[in-house]
Amino acid sequence: MWRSPGRRCRRRHWWARRATAWRSWSIRSRSGIATRRWAGSDESLADMAEITADKALASADIRPAALDCVIVATFTHLKQTPAVGTEVAHRIGATGAAAFGISARCAGFVHALSLAADMVRGRGGHVLVVGAERMTDLLDHEDRSTAFIFGDGAGVVILGPATMSGVGPVVWGADGSQADAISQTVPWDALRDDPHLRWPALRQDGQKVFRWAVYKMAEVAQQALDAAGVRAADLEAFVPHQANLRIIDGLARGSGLPDHVVVARDVVTTGNTSGASIPLAMEALLNAGSVRSGGLALLLGYGAGLSYAAAVVALP
């Protein structure tokens, strides 16, 4: 049947709207993610870390010069050297502070937090811990299995001396036999050998990661509770890495958490921000008044490697 050009155009637009709505529904049903935030083209990883660190220092009423160490957990800093931690320390005025970065992917923040707690116990002083990621630098924006998941962000906590420790013993480890579950498409030296290759990007086997995270991490969560000498009923919050809403809900069920324990689900509005997801989720809970400062929370980071780290903490 013949149709006017206008009719055909309207029909194509209708199909386009329908396809867009279908993709939006599919993304949310698969991951729980409704929105996420991407840094501007002129906003670097160090910029995000600096801004967040300044806010944390002001909130804690601590002078930058009083910091003894700055640790930045990230894997999206695109320079092998120097570590972005040194740049962040300089920018915020932490003159003379030790500064370095660690790379444990989505588990990096809890690794850094544990290192910082040990420093404070052993040396005293104050340690600034940053989880910062600019995930958009390492995405293949045409990869439908990863591009919609990830966001950019940064979060900071400051640890200092106290009469009672606010960070419990860490339970951590890695399963390198499954390292290919989340990996980079090609190593950096491949670009040197063949400059025509596509930019290295993040890739993952979503089903393999889901199965490992839901079953293995429920065990790790219980181990962290046992190490801290607390029960699940003693918790106010459970703050796992914000990878995927289905994984978060599966972990909450598998860990047997009581109904009163608030489960962080910041992934719905921020997406997966890797090493930044746990501090961002903690801040969201505190700002919303869902939990109180000083309440106990179980933090659980997991990701590429496959690495993991969990600890019970008193919320800042």
Image (spheres, rainbow, N blue to C red):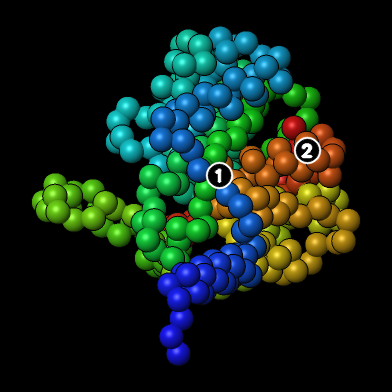
How many marks the image carries: the answer is 2
Instruction: Judge by depth and name the residue closer to the eye, 225 or 261.
Output: 261
Residue in front for this viewpoint, 283 or 176: 283
Q: Residue at x 55, y 71 (%)?
A: 14
According to the picture, the residue beneath numbered tag 1 turns out to be 37
Image quadrant in which the C terminus is located: top right
Q: Is residue 96 visible?
A: yes
Q: Tell me if residue 192 comes above or below residue 219 in the rendering.
A: above
Q: What secondary structure is found at the residue carrying circle 2?
A: helix
Q: Residues within 10 Å of mark 1 (few under 14, many from 20)?
A: some
Give the mark toward the camera: 1 or 2. 1
Residue type at tag 2: Leu
Image position, residue 288 (x, y; %)? 81, 40
Real-space Cα distance between discs 1 and 2? 20 Å
Residue at horizontal 56 percent and vertical 9 percent from the top: 65
Image: 120 above or below 152? above
In the image, is 266 to the left or to the right of 18?
right
Q: Residue at x 63, y 45 (%)?
A: 278
Task: Residue 218: tell me if it is visible.
Answer: no
Residue sitting at the far bottom: 1
Instruction: Tell me if mark 2 has few (under 14), some (14-19) or many (20+) residues whose alpha carbon lies within 10 angstroms of its own.
Output: some
* 278 lies left or right of 59: left
Residue 286: image tag: 2
Left or right relative to 171: residue 253: right
The mark that comes first in sequence, 1 or 2, is 1
In the picture, the quarter occupied by the N terminus is bottom left
Circle 1 SS class? loop
Residue 183: image location, x then y, percent: 37, 59
Query: What x and y, as percent, mark residue 80?
Result: 29, 36
Nearer-the-camera pick, 14 or 257: 14
Quadrant hosting residue 120? top right
Mark 1 residue type: Arg
